[in-house]
Image: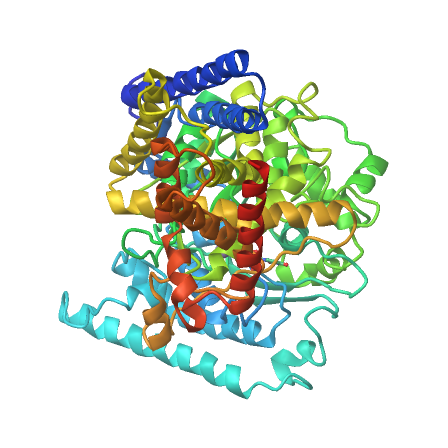
Amino acid sequence: MAKPNALSLYQKVELQRPLQRALDATIFFLLLALLGYRLLLVRTHGLCWLYAIAFLCESWFAFFWALTANLTWTPVHYQTYPQHLLKRVEELPRVDVFITTADPGLEPPIITINTVLSLLAVEYPANKLACYVSDDGCSPLTYYSLSEALKFAKIWVPFCKNYRVEVRAPFRYFSDDLSSAGSPEFQYEWRRMKDAYDALNQRIEDAAKSFTFGDLAGDLADFSNTKPKNHAPIIKVIWENKEGIEDELPHLIYVSREKRPNITHHNKAGAMNVLTRVSGLMTNASYMMNLDCDMFVNNPDVILQAMCLFKDPINGEYAFVQFPQCFYNGLQDDPFANQWIIMMQVKMRGLAGIQGPAYMGTGCIHRRKVLYGQSPNEANINEKYYDDELYKTFGNSKDFVTSATRVLRSVEDYPNCLADTIKATHEVATADYEHNSCWGSKVGWQYGSIVEDVLTGMLIHKKGWKSAYLTPTPPAFLGCASSGGPIPLNHHKRGITGLLETLISKNSPIVTALSDKLQFRQRMFYLWIYLASVQAIPRICYALLPAFCLIANFHFLPKVQEPVICIPLLLSVLFVLRQMLGYIETDQSIRAWWNNHRMDMIKSMCSCLLGVVAVLLKIVGLSETTFEVTKKESASSSDDTESSDRDLGRFTFDESPMFVPITTVMMIQLAALAIGFLGTQPGRREFGVGEVTCSVWLVLCFWPILKGMFAKGSYGLPWSTLFKSSALAFLFVYLCRMSTK
Ligand SMILES: O=c1ccn([C@@H]2O[C@H](COP(=O)(O)OP(=O)(O)O[C@H]3O[C@H](CO)[C@@H](O)[C@H](O)[C@H]3O)[C@@H](O)[C@H]2O)c(=O)[nH]1
Ligand SMILES: [Mn+2]
């Protein structure tokens, strides 16, 4: 590792994890040994379907293990030195920031404006920033909230900078009472800010109650008689930093793209592409950062941190710098496994040591030219771009094509007077602007999957670009993790559906293996993430094997007296140890490990399976996959709803078909254990210790489901689910018994 020189902006540190590597390799060889044992069995006992299924599932697990171990084989950590960059402030490039919101009901405007406020207050020259808020809900309430937030920003931003406030999202900042901390002057200011924020909150709440969505006057007239899915584009400059003053506020622009019922809008990817074009016409910064509406800036230095990586040429250009997704509303020991700590702190760091982290949809800064389709080898070459090709690629706006050409030629652009560009921005925000252009395929955020982020990032990596991963302390951004109940499972199902869509599309990393520039191990990562979606099938099959054996008096695992039993035994122990190690490494509890393991099993049998079904339905043309926006808890309501407090950490259920497979598997395990222990299976009974252990382990994993079988209300599984699952479980037991006759 080279020593940083006095002016270097960052350092890439390789992390050593010899113990983890040794465990990963041992587990892999044990899996191979298990497969060898299966093959020997076939030689001695002949082929039987029970062993065949076990062999297939175990081959899958071995293959998947290799993919998983690949991820964390060579982790790296980036150390940045923003203080060195501060000596070159004049060189800092301009950044356009995009914040997306889609539904004022599911994403209360108070959350969105907190994100906006935290962004307006970042430590970066205000004249080099512009904040664009995309509102797919076309909501006058969102617009009103933003314009009210601007008034508050005028006192909030100077306050944050004066007192070097750390957390600049007011709802989080005011959750600690600092009224008697610091100097009297600070106390006075703190109180003033708090009162102003409370008043802002109140105005928004009042507006939410009193707005009538028909004829609107004044500033809101544009929203008159609009429907969220049927309206003309609305683009409004809420604030313009006209003189380009460094310590004023950055530009703030509201964008609601045109929507028409008969024209597909491509969900978030569509919104991002409109923002790209609108900002291209207004400010055309060379860097674009994007945030989901609930992901506020938690570390005011984030943009500076990212610039350390972009500005330092020693390692070649990075296409994007991704920050982890972290959440502020984590429950103790992560009962719903929605904090993603292992993914963010271990797996993504591992990826950073290959070609780079995946793009995760939020908390990321891209070079604009990368999204305009440029490859690394074309970078900075002043090539000749032909006009007609440019129009075919970027659509028919002359102004936009001019701005795009400057980006492709790496010519730094100067911001326009925003008011002068409004007319042109309307043109690029129409619903049919992208017809016969390359938006969503060759340029911009990609269409074709509801997980547009992984897909968009993959296409960038396929061109040969690298990306970087930064994990500053305090965390760069914090968002709202979906709480308990069916919501996270639906959220997971949506993810699985989108990933699977990509796996079977023309963009699949398998299909393009010969023609793209993905590094081999990066391709293994993309396979890992896409194939995680089909994990459900081998897992369910494997979960049914011990139950079948207990019911029908067979064995699929070696008996205790056979020496080979040590293979599955050692495998299980090492596997658990390996997983726990990750939790210890990231300062989490053993309980958190158990919760995550349990949720992983539950998810693969609920949401994963349903995701697979959704894609199958799409293939046969029976339904389209949909992007359901996740509900975000209102920032101000967290402490006044009793019911949500009671829900904390407890599972809730609904009528969703998602719960049928898992309840069935649970019932089958119970039936199998009962039959196994009561010895009612045909023939002489031999106690299968391995099978019983597997079954008991599954019951423990699915404990919340077992509780749901007996609980009432939303904590209980609905009758219809119980009924369907009992019927299926009964059928399974019956078939098992039949097979032995
Ligand atoms: O038609 C739409 C649908 C969604 N959104 C926005 O997209 C963001 C993400 O939606 P959310 O429901 O919060 O999804 P999550 O699963 O939490 O989001 C993760 O997964 C998405 C799909 O992979 C990524 O786009 C996100 O950035 C990533 O945080 C939110 O800001 C929405 O407002 C839109 O702007 N328009
Ligand atoms: Mn989200």
46 or 213, nearer to the observer: 46
Tell whether 83 sits left or right of 605: left
State the quadrant of the N terminus: top left
Residue 9 in the image, given as x and y percentages of width and height: 36, 30
Tell whether 665 sits left or right of 691: right
**Residue 195 visible at all:** yes
668 or 326, nearer to the observer: 668
Residue 729 in the image, given as x and y percentages of width and height: 53, 52
Residue 26 in the image, given as x and y percentages of width and height: 35, 18
State the quadrant of the C terminus: top right
Q: Residue furthest front?
A: 683
Quarter of the image for residue 143 reads: bottom right
Check the image and report above or below for 418 versus 451. Answer: below
- Look at 55% across and 36% down and name the residue there: 740
Quarter of the image for residue 75 reads: top left
- Look at 51% across and 52% down and name the residue there: 664
17 or 188, nearer to the observer: 17
- Look at 74% across and 58% down and name the residue there: 424
**Residue 634 visible at all:** no
Ligand 1: quadrant of the figure: bottom right
Quarter of the image for residue 375 reads: top right
Residue 20 in the image, given as x and y percentages of width and height: 31, 24
Tell whether 379 sits left or right of 163: right
420 or 114, nearer to the observer: 114
